[in-house]
């Protein structure tokens, strides 16, 4: 619960976005480790909106694919599109499907215009 406050203080002392990415990643990952997907998605959403980066996106993609949570997966894809665009976001999701052995879903992603 204090982690966001500590990270915020650290971020205020850092200048560039690249150096804070590992910290932002931990703010999402901590919820996934605790099996609290809703809080992970909430943190991800807040961090995307605040810092325009995608901390722990692949971890979140993987968890949502494994859980077959299509609704939240779409939210993460939409947020990703807002930062890096549709093409890269869909390739990233396709990569996650392949890594999880979901070849049929990956194939559909690549066949969809």
Image: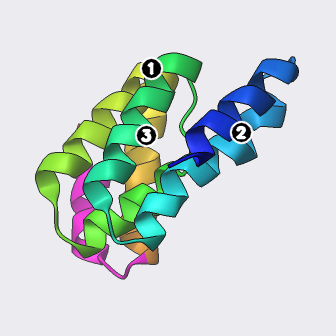
Q: Position of residue 14 (x, y in %)?
A: 86, 23
Q: Which residue is mark 3?
A: 44
Q: Residue at x 69, y 39 (%)?
A: 6
Boundaries of the magenta span: 100-111
Q: Residues within 10 Å of mark 1 (few under 14, many from 20)?
A: some
Using the image, tell me which numbered label, if any, was put on residue 49: 1
Please report contact status of discs 3 and 1: CB closer than 8 Å, yes or no.
no
Query: In the rendered view, would you say 50 is above or below 24?
Result: above
In space, the residues marked 2 and 1 are separated at their CA atoms by 14 Å
Query: In the rendered view, would you say 63 is above or below 11?
Result: below
Q: Is residue 110 magenta?
A: yes
Q: Left or right: 102 with respect to 5?
A: left
Split into 4 quadrants, where in the image is the C terminus? top left
In space, the residues marked 3 and 1 are separated at their CA atoms by 9 Å
Q: Position of residue 18 (x, y in %)?
A: 80, 31
Q: Position of residue 76 (x, y in %)?
A: 32, 41
Q: Residue at x 16, y 61 (%)?
A: 69
Q: Residue at x 35, y 68 (%)?
A: 63
In space, the residues marked 3 and 2 are separated at their CA atoms by 12 Å
Q: Residues within 10 Å of mark 2 (few under 14, many from 20)?
A: some
């Amino acid at each position: 619960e204090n982690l966001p406050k500590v990270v915020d203080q650290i971020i205020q002392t850092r200048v560039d976005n690249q150096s804070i990415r590992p910290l932002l990643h931990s703010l999402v990952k901590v919820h996934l480790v605790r099996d609290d997907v809703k809080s992970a998605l909430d943190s991800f959403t807040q961090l995307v909106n605040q810092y325009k980066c995608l901390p722990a996106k692949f971890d979140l993609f993987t968890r949502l694919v494994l859980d077959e949570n299509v609704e939240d997966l779409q939210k993460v894809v939409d947020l990703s599109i807002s930062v890096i665009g549709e093409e890269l976001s869909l390739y990233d999701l396709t990569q996650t499907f392949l890594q999880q052995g979901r070849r049929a879903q990956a194939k559909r992603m690549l066949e969809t215009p």
